[in-house]
Amino acid sequence: MTNEAAFVTLRQSIPRCKMLTYGPNSAITSLHFDEFARNNPGFKAYFDPLPFVEFDAVQIDSGPFDHESIEIWGQNTILVRDRLTPMSAFTMVPQPDWVMFLLPNVWKGDFRVAGQLSDPGDVFYLDAEQEWFTAAAARDTLSLGVRRSVLSKACANLLGVDFVDLTLGSHTLANGAAITAVLYKIYTKATAAADEVGFINGRLIVPPVLEADMISELASALNQSTDSEAMISEPHRGSLYVVSRARDALRKAGPAAVSIANLCEEVGVSRTWLHHSFIAVFGISAGQYLKLHRLSLAREYLLNSTISQNTVKNVSIGLGFSTSGRFAREYRALFGEYPSDTLGRVW
């Protein structure tokens, strides 16, 4: 699906928005993204400075993992525009004091956020009280992360009250159109300011005064929302709980040591409900997720040149593949190259 209305609005409101590119001569250039995945081994390294405790990416479709992004930082905010080509499932565990507003602009097929299918114009409020799950192909998204305590104070100040509780749970905002307009406005101002300020300590920065205005505008739009409680339906909440518990088991034991039966036992659900939950959250079965998770980890290990013992054989055995030949075939089907080719580029 393509969010045509939102994308047209974005292009009209930001007709010549300047994107960013990194390199030896780091500079802001018109309509270019940072081709991060091509210049930096290990996609997870991209997320190290971001406000996440944990991040996991599982590539679902075959082909290169093309990722382009722009990040603009403030003291209490981070604005991110992302483009990602292959169908991929993301799990993010944010730092406790952060919330995020996620606006899908363009995507192919289904865009799943916290077990819900995105419709054109939807804006999602992602709460740090829960893991953030997304799954989509050919995605172009705009995200604004804000410290919850700072946004809560801004909301309270505008309402003339002592405290506003923003522990709302992850859900679709009821006034998506108003929030969308604010996000586009913030994006326009922040990119223009970053163009002027440039890089400071390796980051693109939004000035403090402008950041305060951005937070105030967002708080005003949020105060006008009818969302007083999280709007996740019980079936979705059940699926999110199951997937979250299953991923806990993966974290503790490692993907190679966990079978579908183990996951069912750990979570306390049937194979059918485990399958249903992963379909609802990521669009693929638990078995498919487990296999693709292992293959994605294998690629990360092979790209990690600091671990000298990472041979193709060691990686395939360590991640539970029965033979190196089977591992190589499945790896090539997903990533378009053999594992030895990946390792050869690093060495």
Image (cartoon, rainbow, N blue to C red):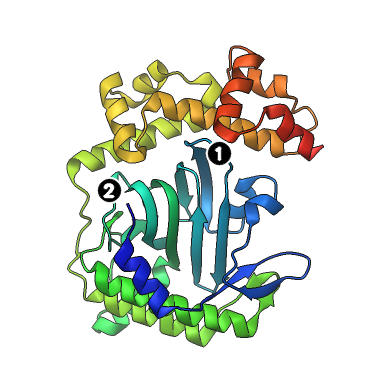
Q: Is residue 219 left or right of residue 235?
A: right
Residue under circle 2? Answer: 117
Residue under circle 1? Answer: 63
Q: Is residue 276 above or below residue 234?
A: above
Q: Nearer the viewer, residue 212 or 199?
A: 199
How many numbered markers are drawn? 2
Q: Amino acid at mark 1?
A: Gly
Q: Is residue 115 above or below residue 157?
A: above
Image quadrant holding the C terminus, namely top right
Q: Is residue 191 left or right of residue 337?
A: left
Q: Is residue 270 visible to the viewer in this orientation of the structure? A: no
Q: Amino acid at mark 2?
A: Leu
Q: Residue at x 78, y 39 (%)?
A: 346
Please provide percent x and percent y for residue 9: 35, 73
Please provide percent x and percent y for residue 157: 31, 83
Mark 1 surroundings: few (<14), some (14-19) or many (≥20) residues within 10 A = some
Q: Is residue 317 visible to the viewer in this orientation of the structure? A: yes
Q: Residue at x 34, y 37 (%)?
A: 283
Structural distance between the alpha carbons of marks 2 and 1: 24 Å
Q: Is residue 222 above or below residue 337?
A: below
